[in-house]
Amino acid sequence: MRLRTTLFILTFSSASLSAQNWTGINQSNYNGANAFYYNTAMATSSPFMVSANGFAMGMNFDNNYLTYKLPFTMSQWVRGTVPSRYKDSEGRVAFQSDWFEETLDGKVKNFDFNIENRGPGAMYNYDRKFAFGFFSRTRIGLQGFGISEDLARIFRYGLDSSKSVIFDPPNEIKFGDEISDNSFSVNINSFSEIGIGGAAAIINSQYIKFSVGANVKYLMGMGTGYVKNNGTTFKVSGYDSINFGKMDFEYGYVQPDFFSNLNSINYMNGKPAGSGFGFDLSAYVELKKPNHKIGSYVEIPDVEYFFRGGISLQDIGSIKYTEGVIARSIQNSSPKTWVPGIEFAQAWSTGLGGGMHYMDSLTRTMFQVTEINEITATLPTTLMLHGDLKIISKFYIGAQIIQSLRGRQSVSFRKPSSITLVPRFEIKGVEVSVPMSLYNDYKNANLGAFLRLGPFFFGTDNLVTSISRSSFKGFNYYFGISYGFGNSKMEDRK
């Protein structure tokens, strides 16, 4: 029997290291009600009197450990034309372990899978002085940080080996070797939010405009789970057995069966498992062309500013789960040996709920356990700075910095920090931009693309992996419909 953990299946087979930032639509002058997700204070400068978000979706996954090396192209997979020799008896693609190529660089492994659905939402902008509206969003995330390369390889290869090593060179681990440098965290969260927001122009003169904005949102938690390994020493002492030494470990979850059908998650999905409140705060400034006069109810003119910028504090708040919670802190100072038997496989074969119930019973039997009565899942709080410089008519260069304010060990989503440069061409009906970013806490480079045609937009923050034919570590995209109508009234400014 192979000791395969569900963690590996959920992570490195579908994960993401570049958080979904929706960079193209965020930077646009025509983002309309999408400003509520980025910088609410910007809404006072929308060229539209009314803007509505229909539906928008973003999804991405990647990782820094495994690369898919498919024997067919992505287009064949999408079109359903994968050769039959790569399918199982039910006609589904039968993925093989040898389709994955490891990245062995001695660095810790991270992953971050996320889905975001936006809408419906709407905004009303009065005289470019006051704006208010409502918005909704659902987010699903699975993240892990700091998993050592040795531990990741054990998750991949399991312990079923007749050799003297757990996995083959390079960097092999032998049976009996002690593994201790393995602190890591894993989180899974799903929640929806319904919010209202407003913005007001405090200064609105011929030369400068300064606005402030805020959102308040009600959070409905659909499910959560976490693992925090603060430091555990163990040895793979033999065939299908693990000897635990010192242990400092935490885990908790709510409603594991809920994640078996992620497509059903939305803000109308019945009674939430947890609830809470969240807030966003923002400020925005425009520096305008001297002696530039704009009349009332004009057609959308050449954009008035030569520079704009803003700051926003996003996703302050948390969701508290108190019902159906199983959460434990585990300590151990004396050696313990675990030899999984047939009951281990039988429990996991019944599903996620059965497997988790088995592990709950096992931890109570083997280790010192402290029960925890509630789980507080925090939002992915970030500080965002952005700016936009008009180069010539219809051509701009924007930039944004996202700095995560959540630690890697927090029980929450965590949006990795990034810095992005966004050159773009923009008119009312068409917009094209090419975001260039340093992501993954400023460690890796990415190239993206964004296109808006009327109310329709499509973008990716990671163009290279998204268009790869058969070798990739993931993909990233977002698309949606956002429509604005009516020209926001602007008084003459002298």
Image (spheres, rainbow, N blue to C red):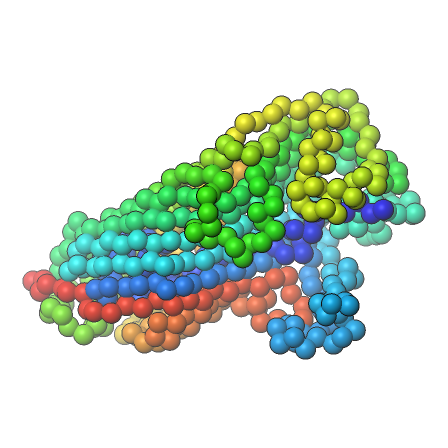
Expressed as whole percent of the image width and height from the top left, the position of residue 118 reads: 41, 58
From the viewer's side, name the closer residue of 262 and 307: 262
Residue 142: x and y, percent?
A: 57, 49
| Quadrant of residue 244 within the rendered picture | top right
Total labels: the figure holds: 0
Above or below 109: residue 78: below
Give the residue displayed 61% in from the left and 46% down from the top.
257
Percent coordinates x, y for residue 168 in the rendering: 85, 52
**Is residue 408 in view from this perspective?**
no
Q: Position of residue 296 (x, y in %)?
A: 11, 68
Image position of 203 (left or right of 171): left
- Classify residue 176 as left or right of residue 301: right
Quarter of the rendering containing residue 261: bottom right
Name the outermost residue toward the left.
Answer: 494
Front-most of residues 305 and 35: 35
Residue reaching furthest to the front: 270
- Between residue 79 and residue 358, name the one nearer to us: 358
Location of the C terminus by quadrant is: bottom left
Q: Quadrant of residue 217?
A: top left
Q: Is residue 300 above or below residue 262?
A: below
Which residue does the image show at 33% across and 58% down from the upper left?
121
x 70%, y 75%: residue: 82
Residue 259 visible in the picture: yes
User: Which residue corresponds to the image point at 71% horizontal and 67% vertical from the top-left?
Assistant: 92
Is 204 located above or below residue 144 in the figure? below
